[in-house]
Image (tube, rainbow, N blue to C red):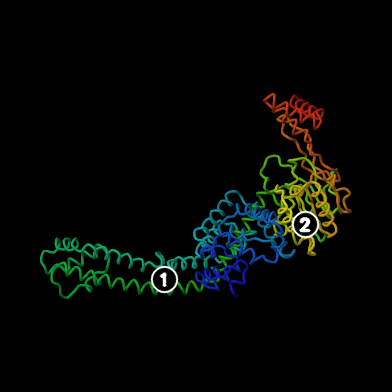
Amino acid sequence: MRLEEYWGIGPKTSELLAEELGVERAVEAIESADTRTLTAAGLSRGRATRILRRATGEESMDLLATRDTRDVYKELLDLAEEYAVTADAADRIRVLTPLPTREAMADRLDDVLAAKETWAALADDEQAAVLDAFGRYDADGGERAAVETAIALRETGVGEGVFEPIAALDGDALADARAALAGLAGGDRVGEGADDELDRLRDRLGQVEDLAAATPEVVEAVQESARRPDEFPDALVRYVTDETGVDASRVRDAMPDEATDARDFVDAALRDLRRSLREGVEEREAAVADRLETDLAAARGDIDAAVAAVGDVALSVSLARFAIAFDLSRPEFVDRETIAVRNARNLAIADAEAVQPVTYAVGDHDLEVHSANDPPSGDRVAVLTGANSGGKTTLLETLCQVQLLAQMGLPVPADAAEVGLVDTVVFHRRHASFNAGVLESTLRSVVPPLTDGGRTLMLVDEFEAITEPGSAADLLHGLVTLTVDRDALGVFVTHLAADLEPLPDLARTDGIFAEGLDPDLELQVDYQPRFGTVGKSTPEFIVSRLVANAGDPSERGGFETLAEAVGEAAVQRTLSDARWTEGE
């Protein structure tokens, strides 16, 4: 296969990968989503990630129909990546994509939730031991590190659930593989510790080389122990063997038959001895390398199994830790077109104090809620209205997170969720750019998914922010109608609910309500939408806070004028309620 057939790989990138990796290895790296190999070859991490996402999930990436949908997708991956136990697992998380079939989604969900159960059952010290073992894999991320990690994981004693592939590896074979990999870690040079005899020869060679670099000192030392010239050779043998451990016979064999003086004699002897030892090292190294290559070939299956097991288990544990951190649960995939959530939480604020979970739904659902404010079933489109800072945009983003996570085969941030699969998710955040170009580009991004015949989830926030209110109401009513007519699902946030009446059948209006100010004059909002009713923006609460906080009399007078405009009695009642609550 030509490298340029992959999305994002042009002639220059193809040439780079072919030169650095070779075509066959480059293709293997792309097909296996091996980010590390591609970045080592010279690609930036971002470019490698984009290429691999398309290579491994091209048929499903069209789910991300708008820039804002793609931003949510990337934010989800960023959150999950924080819980990666190895750099390789982080790379694999970055290239997770929506999956093409319900079966693939269910399979990944089963793996992640099984890993979640296994990880949650481990004691703190067991988790720490496992994380320490995975830390070995990040040493270089290669085969040797994978084998070292597999051995370390087996030594933790954790071998159930997600760790069963590690426990199933042959411990003795892994030990042999570790020895072979360690021995050949230097490429053509056999590593230290691979063979005792080779290490001894190398050590002696090094000591002889040190002596050869200090010939005058050697001559002086030998002459001190030799009383007569004929004793000099024996003295040299004793000195060299004492200093290096080389056999006396080997030293004697290296001595020259003739020499002009003592220094020439020592130089010639050490030179020949060094050559002899170097030949001995090379011969021994070649023999050891052959043995190690044989051992490595015999261990190849165990090495490959260790690499695969460590990589897969690291990814599963990473996603399990992500699921536990955010209390994610299994969504139910349904044939009906719906998205319905009970007690859903936005992952971006999941660690905020006193987060109010939200229950919401559009489409046909059977979600059991058992509250006085159950989301109705059957309405395909909802127009969401209500208080400023009331969580309307956050709710849209939460629904987008749930839909994307579910179709990626990952658990979702809700106590329960029914999810019907869609072909595209159109999420459009409020963008305060009021010009014809923005309007046109927005319509080009949100309308085509509704008209191409696929299943679509529309999540549109304050469409009126990009054009004048009168035209915005007409266009928004048209979008709601088109969404219903095309059998799509949609939630549209707007402050123009009154201008959208009458809504088409299968569409409803929901509202979020502000309930007042607390004693600190902070806005109190019930973030749970009330179904079938228009929410209130309640500007009197905001004006009340401004009146109460105004320190300058002139400034206070200006805000009091605004209070008259929005209803002075309502402002005074709000301030009175806040003070009464504080006194209570």
- Residue shown at 80%/64% (left/top)? 453
Above or below residue 22? Residue 441 is: above
Q: Position of residue 490 (x, y in %)?
A: 80, 54
Q: Position of residue 226 (x, y in %)?
A: 13, 64
Position of the C terminus by quadrant:
top right
Could you classify mark 1 by the number of other residues whose Cα lies within 10 Å: few (under 14), some (14-19), or many (20 or more)? few
Please say whether residue 112 is visible from this viewpoint.
yes
Q: Is residue 284 left or right of residue 326?
A: left
Above or below residue 413? Residue 45 is: below
Mark 1 belongs to which amino acid? Asp
Mark 2 belongs to which amino acid? Leu
Cβ–Cβ below 8 Å for labels 2 and 1? no
Disc 2 designates what residue?
457
Q: Quadrant of residue 70?
A: bottom right
User: Helix, strand, or loop for circle 1?
Assistant: loop
> Between marks 2 and 1, how big is the CA–CA gap?
58 Å
Q: Position of residue 200 (x, y in %)?
A: 33, 66
Which is nearer the eye, 7 or 444?
444
Position of the N terminus by quadrant:
bottom right
Please say whether residue 401 is visible from this viewpoint.
no
Seen from this angle, which residue lies furthest front? 436
Residue 474 - label: none
Q: Quadrant of residue 441?
A: bottom right
Which is nearer the eye, 261 or 337?
337
Disc 1 designates what residue?
188
Which is nearer the eye, 219 or 495?
495
Could you classify mark 2 by the number of other residues whose Cα lies within 10 Å: few (under 14), some (14-19), or many (20 or more)? many
Q: Position of residue 326 (x, y in %)?
A: 67, 49
Looking at the rendered image, the disc whose residue lies closer to the viewer, 2 or 1, is: 2
User: Helix, strand, or loop for circle 2?
Assistant: strand
